[in-house]
Image: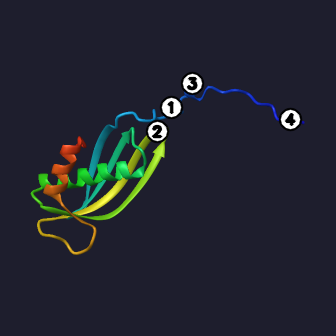
Amino acid sequence: MRPLLIPVALAALPGCEAAVPGAAPAYLGVETNLLDGDLVNFHVAMTGATGPEDVIRYARCAAAGYAQIRGYGFARHVRTVTDERSGVWSADAVYTISPALPRGTRTIDAEVVAADCRQSGIPVV
């Protein structure tokens, strides 16, 4: 017996909108939460990402901009968790911010990174 195939228009179902391949990125905003002293949580979302690296870069840009706003020159990446649902990529990232170069290999110079983000059209906080 052959299975019954029923055509379904996924685009017509709520919440099933697919990202258009090659669409320009749309940055949907940044939410920041100061966790403790110099530890900051960033929630970012975007559409038009080609993969998790795009939303991770968006979170990095947010961290660099936030560090600058607070008068700090550096940030250190602690962790990032990404997710994709119906074409919307999100990242939940945690960074420490500091006035001096922190220890570790996952550090960023806020001024350099923020300038690169602005030049690439990625918003900073």
Label 1 sits on a secondary structure element that is loop
Tell me whether the residue at label 2 lies in contact with that at label 4, contact meaning CB atoms closer than 8 angstroms.
no
> Viewed as shown, does residue 80 lie left or right of 3?
left
- Kindly report the distance in space between the C-alpha atoms of the residues bearing marks 2 and 3: 15 Å
Reading the image, the residue beneath label 4 is 2
Reading the image, the residue beneath label 1 is 17
> Viewed as shown, does residue 2 lie left or right of 120?
right
The amino acid type of the residue labelled 3 equals Ala
Residue 36 in sight: no
How is the rendered protein coloured?
A: rainbow
Tell me whether the residue at label 3 lies in contact with that at label 4, contact meaning CB atoms closer than 8 angstroms.
no
Reading the image, the residue beneath label 2 is 87
The amino acid type of the residue labelled 4 equals Arg
Q: Residues within 10 Å of mark 3 (few under 14, many from 20)?
A: few
- Kindly report the distance in space between the C-alpha atoms of the residues bearing marks 3 and 4: 27 Å
Q: Quadrant of residue 112?
A: bottom left
- Kindly report the distance in space between the C-alpha atoms of the residues bearing marks 2 and 1: 7 Å
Circle on res. 12: 3
Q: Residue 13 appears at what percent x and percent y?
A: 57, 28
- Kindly report the distance in space between the C-alpha atoms of the residues bearing marks 1 and 4: 30 Å
